[in-house]
Amino acid sequence: MTASIPWPFAQRIGGLVAGAHPLAGSYHIEQLAATLPAVVATANQAVAEETGLALAGLPEVAVVSRREWVERNVSAFSSMLEPAERRLAERIERTGVDGANLAHRVVAGQTGAVLGFLARRVLGQYELVVPTGEQGDSIAFVGGNLLHMERAHQLNPKEFRTWVALHESAHRAQFVGVGWMRGYFSGLVTEMVESAVPDEARLSRLVDQIVSSRRAHTPVIDESGLLGLFAGPSQRAALERIQALMSLLEGHGHVVMDRLGDRMLVSRPRMSSLLKARRSDPRTALFFKLTGLELKMRQYEEGERFVLAVEKQAGWQAISLAWSDAGALPTLAEIRAPEQWLRRVA
């Protein structure tokens, strides 16, 4: 019996869906890799000044292919979920749940397909977890996607690369500049994963649900992602805290990127409108709807509205209250009602 999710299968599916950009492996990628460290250094300094968060040193900068991006993320997921997978496999061996092998393969296939689709679109990613499973401090850019956007829309390469770097540097500021954030995030994931093995009855229902979804060609992975598959009622609170945190971080990152872009980059309005149009593409919208990622994208938009509402009511510096300690972070309900968060923390 298969002991765990077949992650190599997820990588293969992801790689097939992602495909390869025509310029992958060309000298254009080498030139891109040579320019990005200086771009990230500039973005790093600008973000530190804008947010007031201290950013010591610089991150590692990697330019990867779509397939490599899939592999890095599959490796990170497999590392994060390893404790839960191990205990889940032991319970399956002990109880003999029918269909477990097929369920594992369905989860791997759908995970690979989602990552493969995203790999065709993602531009950059601040990496908290590196493929070895250790905590990282690196920004990975998908080189082919960056070059495609620049060429397809005749963007100024230096400005576009700086704009993307500002967003990823904002995420780095949140995890490096807020001393407790990295440990808090890791603790939330660990808390959920270590307690997320379902009892025998729920395990059997979960396997049946996954197998049925395969027959009906419906998605297994919803807005709660892979972690949500392992989460029962007792883990939902931790999952909601993770979702609230990601809404805040993404919303804050978008605002910082756009605000700095307005001051530093002449073409910021056009770049922003292009990416918004890209996200609203009917094919993309359908994919997000079918996989449940539509709700996750909406949460990020709610995070941006939260940050802007807090600034309007109490000033930009009020956002820094969220970085004081974990108890000051907004809940999901407060993300949607910023005035409640302000009353509580201010």
Image: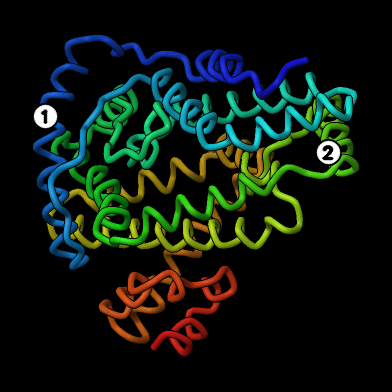
* In this rendering, the label closer to the viewer, 1 or 2: 2
Q: Amino acid at mark 2?
A: Leu
Label 1, secondary structure: give it. Answer: helix
Mark 1–mark 2 CB contact (< 8 Å):
no
Horizontal arrangement in the rendering, residue 178 relative to residue 199 (left or right): left
From the top left corner, tell me how far across and down residue 223 is, in percent. Answer: 63, 48
Residue 217 quadrant = top right
- Name the residue: 40% across, 58% down: 249
From the top left corner, tell me how far across and down residue 342 is, in percent. Answer: 43, 85
Residue tagged 1: 35
Q: Nearer the viewer, residue 60 or 189?
A: 189
Horizontal arrangement in the rendering, residue 44 relative to residue 87 (left or right): left
From the top left corner, tell me how far across and down residue 316 is, in percent. Answer: 27, 77
- Name the residue: 20% across, 63% down: 53
Q: Nearer the viewer, residue 323 or 68?
A: 323
Residue 325 quadrant = bottom left
Q: Quadrant of the C terminus?
A: bottom left
From the top left corner, tell me how far across and down residue 187 is, in percent. Answer: 49, 53
Horizontal arrangement in the rendering, residue 8 relative to residue 152 (left or right): right
- Name the residue: 41% across, 77% down: 309
Horizontal arrangement in the rendering, residue 261 relative to residue 21 (left or right): left
Specify the label residue 203 is tagged with: 2
Vertical side of 86 occupied by 102: above or below: above
Distance between mark 1 and mark 2 Cα atoms: 50 Å
Total labels: the figure holds 2
- Give the mark nearest the N terminus, 1 or 2: 1
Q: Amino acid at mark 1?
A: Thr
Q: Quadrant of the N terminus?
A: top right
- Name the residue: 13% across, 20% down: 31
Label 2, secondary structure: give it. Answer: helix
